[in-house]
Amino acid sequence: MSNVTMDATAILPILKKKLAFLSGGKDRRSGLILTIPLNSDQTSMEELSATLDYLLSIPSDKCKARGFTVIVDGRKSQWNIVKTVVLMLQNVIPAEVSLVCVVKPDEFWDKKVTHFCFWKEKDRLGFEVILVSANKLTRYIEPCQLTDDFGGSLEYDHSDWLNKRLVFEKFTKESTSLLDELTIINDSDKSSSVDKEKSADCALLPSFDPETVLQTGHELLSELQQRRFNGSEGGGGGQAAPAWCPMEEELLAQPQVMKLLDSLREQYTRYQELCRLRNKRTQLDEIHAKVMQVVTWLQGPGSELLKTQQAIGDSMRTAQALQQKHEEIESQHSEWFAVYVELNQQIAALLSAGEEEEVAELKSLQQQLSDVCYRQAAHLESRQNVLQAAHSFHSTTQELSQQLDGLLGMLCADVAPADGASIQQNLKLLEEKLQTVEAGLTSLRQKGGLLLEQMCSQPSWAVEEPESPAGEQQDNVQHIQGVMEEMQLRKQRCEDMVDVRRLKMLQMVQLFKCEEDALQAVEWLSELLDALLKTHVRLGDDSQETRTMLDKHRKFVDVAQSTYDYGRQLLQATVVLCQSLRCTTRSSGDTLPRLNRVWKQFTVSGDERQQRLELALNFHTAAERVLQQENVEAESLDEVDSSGRALLDRLTMPVIFPDGSEQFFGSPSDTAAAAEGVRERLLLVEERRLQLQEARLHNGEEEEEEEVLNGQEGRLDVIGEELSEKEEQDEEEEEAGRHDEDLERATQDC
């Protein structure tokens, strides 16, 4: 097969015009069909000639020997253009043309043809020319070999054909050039393939990417093979035409593509092996250089950076600054550690597929690199742990200092609470703050011990390297111990002050408690006084009941006396506590006068109550005696009568307090009820007097007794009238009391 002598890219715009094309169809002699569609009067003969030259350069000599059948489609063109094209074929391809079929319009050229007969010019032209209409073209060519422009079934896509030609030519050109380059590279390396010290930089690189060229070739070959075995059926006469291929091997040269691919794969395989060996040696050299670079930096500048960083700071702020500086150092190391990880992976990959003589070198590099990196990482981690412990220690120190300041401020502030509850709250808050300080100091001791442990457990540097200064380390230890001792002393001072403040606050709680209890004693005594005046009114109906009430009254007075004494003791304790607390007495100006005033009122009221009960006891005792005796002297009756009247008069009198104020026992009704009992007993005594007088009348003293009796009846009438008046007065008072109660309830409702 002849090589392609023309490049499609050079005349690509002309080829896109489709001035002529090889559709892949064949005539009955198996010659190729060349179609020239004439579409307009502007057909350029130069462009058509160039197109024909390119198309005729594609088929092989064997294919050309079978001759071409040229179809000149003149249905859309003029006769002179057709004639020019036919004559041009004589100059372009006279030997290859077997038959020229000029497709004519139906009636346009009838007169023109008479002036020129191609068959008469056959000898001069060198090929036969026939004029035929499109529907009669099948007399010379099978329909399955004609495109649809001439009523055939052959499929042809000019753009697709042109793209395939471009791909084929590009592949042929690139693969040929690539083969030459790879051959030169592979042959030039034979003499130096055993030289392991040679630089493996692969300076000779091919102009084209072999993978891309191979991929293009495989795709092209696959397309050609697919078109070769995907034929279509021909029509005509009901007989099936044999399979055919529009892109036959003569047109696209499949064997040439396959041969180029085989040669290219062979050379490319050799080239890959060559590059692999060169890259391996280069990779080993690069790994060695990078390993030494990492080791040199870590043992040099990296170690110096860490050796200069030994301080732990004296506050949380300086510790943070040191941590930030350490982070910068870690950042610098992390870049080299990343290189270490990458180198370690590369070495591991080379060890898995390396040769025996390379394995020892790689393992030595790997061990050296790992030792240096792990040692440096241990120093970094130890320094980081020390700084974290230092930051935690300084943070706890600052927090504890603030807690101590707050506790000291609370201790220095004056204590002026309003009541005992607020003092208890302050005392509880003080205890909580002290507990917080104790917990903070415990935490500080723990973190200080951890920091000292971290500092002592730092890994030492290599023997050949100088040790870090011991003075700075000792200063750090002394600083930590000094801080813990200072905090312990501050905490102890605060504890002593807390003890004093606790005692003072407890005394203040006791002071407020005494004052509250003293006020409670005053209230209790006031309640006793109120109960005495309001409820202790009855005097008893007989001597026994009166005696019992007198005993209860004495006990009642004893309770009041105990309450008063209790209040006095509390007030005395208050005075003592105030003196201890160096403050003015709080109760002597208010509570003590109230206590004394209420006690005096109670004393006066109690004495009055006791005197009334004693009078009532004497009255009931004398009355019972005269009522029980058979012979009673008039003087005894007169004594009973006088004592009863004195008692009634006493009931109407108010209690006069030392401040001049007055207070009655009970309500008027209660007083009236007590007086009523006395009057009833007086009435019995008078009846007894009458009985005695009547008895005397029976003994002969009638006149005198009658006078006495009349006198006694007069007295009884007086007593009866007094009782009636008293009852009316009591009813009026009760009515007034009920009116006042109704008025009070109405006022409350409003």
Image: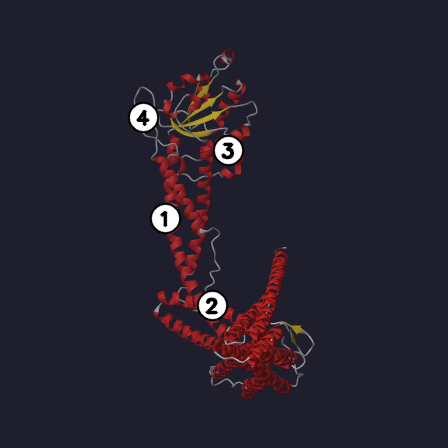
Name the residue that disc number 4 marks. 241
**Label 1: element kind:** helix
**What element does badge 4 sit on?**
loop
- In this view, the mark in front (4 or 2): 2
Residue 416's spot in the image, x, y percent?
Answer: 64, 78
Nearest to N terminus: mark 4 or mark 2: 4
Distance from disc 4 to disc 2, alpha carbons, whole Å, reads 67 Å
Name the quadrant of the C terminus: bottom right
Q: Is residue 581 left or right of residue 254?
A: right
The residue carrying pointer 1 sits among few (fewer than 14), some (14 to 19) or many (20 or more) residues within 10 Å by Cα, namely few
Q: Work out whether residue 679 can be spotted.
A: yes
Image quadrant where one finds the N terminus: top left
Task: Read off the residue under disc 3.
Answer: 15
Q: Which residue is mark 2?
A: 286
What secondary structure is marked by label 2? helix
| Residue 552 in view in this figure | no
